[in-house]
């Protein structure tokens, strides 16, 4: 199974690069060149395909070329489409509307690409190795996000290139937007070839239901009380933590920090984030304790956020004392890292409970719930900038505490249930069994 780790990491790195380009690099270029654009549109709504992609999941569960491998052929075809779209994208004009739809197309393709990758992890990895696949996903997102934001921004800077790279000053940087898109296109083709060579000996999982029943399972997924608890928990715990994880926007709004300082701290977080898998590998085992770890790390975030908010208050009133700024910076970085741990644990839990024959549909439903919370970040940022941050933080803490008390307590019991209890087709199978028994009686 370890031979799949590298291609999975690279596939998620490509997604991370694409998302980082759309949400960070392109808006920064617009700001630098005074191009008018809607910040919320680029930073959050462009991620909307990761929410609505669930509508395509049953199709990917049923339509594939069996001779070339169920998930392998899907991954290769989607990567080829990605490369073609990236290669022919018009990004030279820097028109905000054209750029938005260009990024939307690429992210839509990445969102669909994420479906067969997640299904491949569920179908091909044994239970004691799914956690390692989750860590590969985590590392890919981190490396890709860092590359698409900070590495691209560095080589897209004319000043940096003229100072350190060019012997003769140039008017254009080493890596322009159009050149970056060409590199993304070539990377997609290279990954398609690499995936075709790597994802061999795939065990194609047969379906227990037809396409109509698969869509019916999708529509009535939360009729299963266990699945409803999981979905509610994954959504609410992220929503309650947003006022904590988005504190840097308040610091920017109050001009206590510059965007360069925030970006430097986020870049400083990168090497620490790359070391986390060594720690997480010890936590993610064959037994599913992820929900308990999520609750524990969430409590750590709440406690640490109290220290962070006190430091922010002292910063606002200009009350100085030794190590004030260091404590604030350290608390921000640790909160970001804890947030990454929580999301990784949630994704690992989804992979481990997925025992469905329509695994693409199953994994996509619950990972989309996690992505759905990101769409609220723009709303929370607007509230933070227009309402008192401390009041928003208190509301977030209260909401999150209630979630941990009500939903979290029941989720610790759900955490150790048999995966059979989470199967999407369980209700349909029961209906067919009842019908079969009735026909036998008749």
Image (spheres, rainbow, N blue to C red):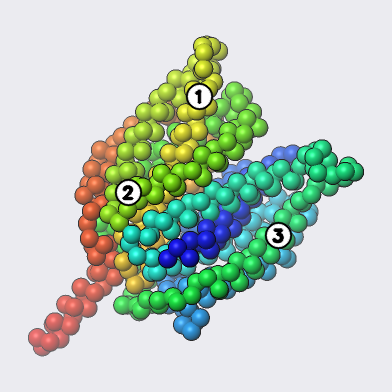
Residue 195 position by quadrant: bottom right
In the image, what residue occupies the spot 58% across and 33% down? 265
Query: Eyeballing the image, is 298 above or below 347?
Result: above
- How far apart are labels 1 and 3 at the CA level? 38 Å
Residue placed most toward the observer, 228 or 266: 266
Mark 1 Cα-neighbour bin, 10 Å: few <14, some 14–19, many ≥20: some
Q: Which of the two labelled residues, at mark 1 and mark 2, occupies the earlier sequence position?
A: 2
What percent of the width, then of the height, locates residue 167?
Answer: 88, 43
Query: Eyeballing the image, is 407 above or below 226?
Result: above
What percent of the width, then of the height, locates residue 96?
Answer: 70, 50
- How far apart are labels 1 and 2 at the CA level? 29 Å
Residue 290: image tag: 2
What percent of the width, then of the height, locates residue 289?
Answer: 29, 49
In the image, what residue occupies the spot 53% across and 54% down? 140
The N terminus, quarter of image: bottom left
Mark 3 Cα-neighbour bin, 10 Å: few <14, some 14–19, many ≥20: some
Q: Identify the secondary structure beneath mark 3.
A: helix
- How far apart are labels 2 and 3 at the CA level? 37 Å
Query: Label 1 belongs to which residue?
Result: 328
């Amino acid at each position: 199974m370890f031979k799949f780790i590298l291609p999975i990491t690279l596939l998620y790195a490509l997604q991370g690069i694409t998302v980082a380009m759309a949400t960070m690099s392109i808006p920064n270029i617009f700001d630098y060149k005074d191009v008018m654009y809607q910040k919320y549109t680029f930073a959050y709504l462009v991620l909307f395909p990761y929410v609505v992609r669930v509508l395509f999941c049953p199709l990917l569960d049923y339509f594939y070329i069996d001779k070339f491998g169920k998930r392998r052929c899907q991954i290769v075809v989607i990567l080829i489409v990605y490369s073609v779209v990236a290669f022919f994208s018009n990004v030279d004009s820097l028109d905000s509307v054209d750029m938005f739809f260009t990024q939307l197309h690429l992210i839509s393709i990445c969102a669909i690409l994420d479906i067969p990758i997640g299904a491949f992890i569920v179908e091909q990895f044994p239970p004691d190795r799914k956690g390692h696949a989750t860590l590969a996903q985590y590392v890919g997102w981190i490396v890709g996000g860092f590359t698409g934001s900070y590495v691209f921004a560095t080589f897209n800077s004319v000043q940096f290139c003229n100072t350190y790279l060019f012997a003769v000053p140039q008017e254009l940087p080493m890596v322009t937007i159009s050149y970056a898109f060409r590199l993304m296109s070539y990377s997609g083709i290279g990954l398609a070839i690499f995936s075709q060579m790597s994802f061999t000996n795939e065990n194609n999982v047969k379906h227990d239901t037809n396409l109509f029943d698969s869509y019916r399972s999708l529509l009535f997924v939360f009729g299963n009380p266990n699945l409803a608890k999981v979905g509610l928990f994954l959504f609410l715990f992220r929503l309650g933590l947003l006022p904590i994880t988005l504190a840097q926007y308040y610091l920017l709004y109050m001009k206590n920090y510059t965007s360069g300082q925030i970006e430097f701290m986020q870049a400083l977080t990168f090497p620490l984030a790359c070391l986390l898998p060594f720690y997480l590998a010890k936590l993610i085992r064959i037994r599913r304790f992820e929900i308990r770890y999520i609750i524990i790390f969430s409590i750590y975030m709440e406690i640490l956020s109290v220290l962070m908010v006190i430091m922010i208050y002292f910063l606002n009133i200009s009350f100085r004392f030794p190590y004030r700024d260091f404590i604030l910076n350290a608390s921000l970085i640790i909160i970001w890292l804890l947030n990454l741990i929580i999301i990784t644990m949630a994704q690992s839990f989804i992979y481990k409970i997925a025992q469905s024959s329509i695994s693409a549909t199953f994994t996509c439903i619950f990972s989309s719930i996690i992505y759905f919370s990101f769409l609220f970040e723009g709303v929370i940022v607007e509230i933070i900038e227009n309402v008192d941050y401390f009041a928003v933080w208190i509301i977030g803490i209260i909401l999150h505490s209630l979630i941990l008390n009500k939903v979290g307590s029941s989720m610790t019991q759900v955490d150790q249930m048999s995966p059979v209890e989470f199967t999407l087709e369980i209700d349909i199978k029961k209906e067919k069994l009842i019908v079969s028994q009735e026909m036998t009686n008749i």
